[in-house]
Amino acid sequence: MWRKKQKALVVTALLLFLLLVVLLSGRNGKGKAEIYERADILMGTSFHGTVYGGKRDVLPELAKELRSLETERLSWREETSEIAKINFLDGKEPYENISAELSGYLTDILDIADRSGGALDPTIGNISRLWDFGGANERLPEQEEIDKFLEKTGYEKLQVSENSIFIPKGVSLDLGAVGKGIGADRAADFIKKQDGIEGAVIALGGSIALIGSKPDRSPWNLAIADPRGKEGEILGLLKLSGEQFVSTSGDYEKYFEVDQKRYHHILNPKTGYPAESGLISVTVVCESGLKSDGLSTACFVLGLERGMELLKEYGAEGVLVDEEKNVYITEGLKSLFDLKDASYKIVK
């Protein structure tokens, strides 16, 4: 019997608001800052923004910015986007005059793909669509179906230059593993260009941008969800300062069960099946939304030991949780993480 647990996007947006634990009070030298908030569905996921200062329409304008990012650059579903146009060519010819923006994203993605040995792979689009996690056709594919598309998977098959990209016939790009992080980067860039904003928290699904500071200069208090708890229950709190990007990948976000076996949405590109690395949640903190998002996925696929090594290569920090409820924290976050669930144990 099929049993499903899918977080409804609107509910998730409200949950994110609760989990951010942002203190909405505080004063600067000019008095109390105005606080603006918005919850929405953007880029196929939940969105929540909290902005301290600036103008009232900043979040609606940011929403337009993120929709543009999706429809012009990233979405394989939107025929107007560059990714959709590249997929449509299906190896007939290179996609010429690629935007500098997308070329830069792909360069960073391929760097993570290479350093992780393919644990992050943007060519997994056809296999992702077979599973269709969270979609109308969510199912457990047949082995033959997966094998067919594995032959057309592999980041090494991409040929990217400054002005063009070529993908062989049958290869399909899907930037879903980094798309929310890219959105967080775009949001931070947009917010920093606005006048009068002291700080902001922008959440797109599991990727969060922390920008500036609260008016009272207290740390951002960011909750990490309990990967085996009920909705709203937390594993622990991170106290962060300044501009940071935080992304979490977990096997509890989108999954279904068949014959009491959990099939989650974080796929191992080498097998075409959900990763079985021993980890159930990975949170990454670093200076880039794209990297935090991509690294959280790659580390989840790689497992604890290799995942920790990859974080070190990038100078990133992380909180990794395994199936035995052991919590592993990189050195830079140990003094900033407060465990809230006694059923978990921090491994020194």
Image (cartoon, helix red, strand yellow):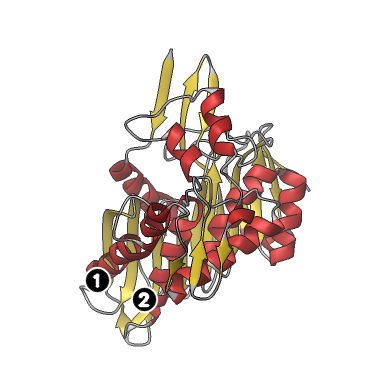
Instruction: Give the residue at mark 2.
Output: 190
Q: Are marks 2 and 1 in contact (CB under 8 Å)?
A: yes
Name above or below for residue 109 compared with residue 33.
above
What x and y, as percent, mark residue 153? Answer: 58, 45
Helix, strand or loop status at disc 1: helix
Q: Which residue is drawn at 71% across and 47% down?
A: 328
What x and y, as percent, mark residue 45? Answer: 35, 49
Q: Quadrant of the N terminus?
A: top left
Instruction: Give the residue at mark 1.
Output: 61
Local crowd at mark 1 within 10 Å, few (<14), some, or many (≥20)? few
Residue 98 is tagged as none
Occupied quadrant, residue 230? top left
Q: In this view, does 47 lie to the left or right of 177?
A: left
The residue lying toward the viewer, choosing from 147 and 271, is 147
Q: Is residue 299 left or right of residue 13?
A: right
Amino acid on which the number 2 mark rests in the picture? Phe
Along the polypeptide, which appears first: circle 2 or circle 1?
1
The residue lying toward the viewer, choosing from 305 and 163, is 163
The residue lying toward the viewer, choosing from 144 and 74, is 144
CA separation in Å, label 2 and label 1: 9 Å
Local crowd at mark 2 within 10 Å, few (<14), some, or many (≥20)? some
Q: Residue at x 59, y 52 (%)?
A: 296
Amino acid on which the number 1 mark rests in the picture? Glu
